[in-house]
Image (cartoon, rainbow, N blue to C red):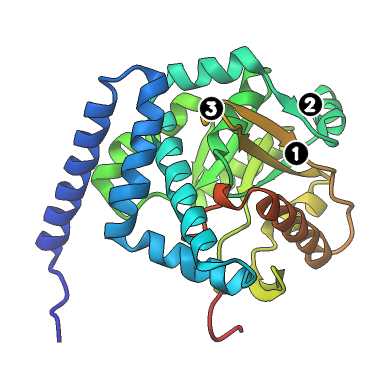
């Protein structure tokens, strides 16, 4: 049986992984923006993804959720998934170059945009239900460019060395951001009560989540976005930064506001909206997550 890593070994491996990542990004930053983004996408899809096992996991999830796809289609989508992930990471670390492109285009659209503008004008709290689709940070940059207060809850990475530069990179795109935990949650609620727009993810497996339908399969889903919506009479809208065919630009789509009913019904509506988006553009969702667990199926 393999021995568990000691604390010193964990620190050493964390530092090694962090150094490798910073090395890749340093080389990438030598390239102009239009070359940098696709190059990092290629690195993730052709090298890092297969080595880390992400490509295999994406194909397994695609087999589970979309069994009608052929093996070649699943392989193609898995490559697109990792390409999009790499591009997104390169965009986050491009800072002002990335946010300036979003500001200059301002492609906010969708059936919920008018309701979002009305909420902003009246300082009504807003829950932005977002997923690991396209580039999450394109949405934050687009809303912040309009002068709207956009906050987000995040989970610090397990690698402390990585957090040292990843969290500042996220802050450079839009603030405030709140770490998961008691103090972060308290600050987040104060921000929301003051009429802020709060981005909350809902597309990952949660151990104590409620079993809801996602791609015809039971999937434990967090109820927190809907519960906060009801508690603070907030506007709840799905929102996605959808990558465009050129691979560099985005359309930020604000979905139809979710009616206030029960937390379960509201989150099921969000699951259904996200499934619709994924079926239209399967390569833009992060299929690497372990969204479905065997015991639930």
Is tag 1's residue or tag 3's residue first in the polypeptide sequence?
1
Q: Give the x, y percent position of residue 163.
A: 32, 42
Which numbered circle lies on residue 126? Answer: 1
Q: Is residue 127 above or below residue 95?
A: below
- The answer to whether the residue labelled 1 contacts the one labelled 2, judged by CB atoms less than 8 Å apart, is yes
Q: Secondary structure at mark 3?
A: loop
Q: Say whether residue 169 is left or right of residue 143.
A: left
Looking at the image, can residue 181 be seen? no
Q: Where does label 3 land, which residue?
A: 174
Residue at 25% across / 20% down in the picture?
Answer: 30
Q: Give the x, y percent position of residue 278.
A: 66, 53
Q: Secondary structure at mark 1?
A: strand
Q: Residues within 10 Å of mark 1 (few under 14, many from 20)?
A: many
Q: Say whether residue 63 is left or right of residue 55.
A: right
Q: Secondary structure at mark 2?
A: helix
Q: Is residue 113 above or below residue 56?
A: above
Q: Is residue 212 above or below residue 35?
A: below
Is tag 3's residue or tag 2's residue first in the polypeptide sequence?
2
Quadrant containing the N terminus in the rendered view? bottom left
- Residue 291 versus residue 125: which sits nearer the camera? 291
Looking at the image, can residue 81 be seen? yes
Quadrant containing the C terminus in the rendered view? bottom right
Q: State which quadrant residue 261 falls in.
A: bottom right
Which numbered circle lies on residue 120? Answer: 2
Q: Residues within 10 Å of mark 3 (few under 14, many from 20)?
A: many
């Amino acid at each position: 049986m393999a021995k568990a890593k000691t604390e010193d070994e964990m620190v050493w491996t964390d530092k090694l992984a962090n150094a490798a990542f910073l090395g890749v990004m340093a080389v990438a930053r030598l390239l102009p923006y239009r070359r940098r983004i696709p190059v990092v996408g290629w690195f993730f899809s052709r090298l890092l993804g297969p080595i880390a096992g992400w490509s295999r996991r994406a194909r397994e999830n695609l087999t589970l959720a979309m069994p009608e796809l052929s093996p070649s289609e699943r392989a193609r989508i898995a490559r697109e998934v990792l390409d999009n992930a790499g591009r997104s990471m390169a965009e986050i670390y491009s800072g002002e170059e990335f946010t300036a492109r979003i500001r200059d285009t301002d492609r906010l659209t969708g059936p919920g945009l008018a309701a979002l503008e009305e909420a902003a004008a009246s300082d009504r709290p807003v829950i932005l239900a977002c997923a690991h689709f396209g580039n999450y940070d394109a949405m934050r940059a687009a809303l912040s460019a309009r002068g709207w207060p956009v906050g987000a809850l995040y989970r610090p990475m397990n690698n402390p060395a990585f957090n040292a530069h990843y969290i500042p990179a996220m802050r450079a795109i839009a603030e405030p951001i709140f770490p998961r935990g008691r103090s972060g949650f308290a600050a987040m609620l104060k921000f929301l009560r003051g009429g802020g727009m709060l981005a909350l993810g809902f597309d990952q497996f949660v151990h104590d989540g409620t079993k809801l339908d996602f791609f015809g399969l039971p999937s434990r889903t967090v109820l927190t976005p809907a519960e906060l919506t009801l508690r603070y009479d907030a506007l709840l809208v799905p929102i996605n930064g959808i990558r465009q065919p050129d691979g560099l630009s985005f359309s930020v789509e604000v979905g139809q506001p979710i009616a206030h009913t029960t937390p379960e019904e509201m989150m099921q509506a969000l699951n259904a909206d996200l499934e619709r988006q994924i079926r239209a553009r399967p390569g833009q969702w992060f299929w690497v997550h372990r969204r479905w667990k065997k015991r639930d199926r």
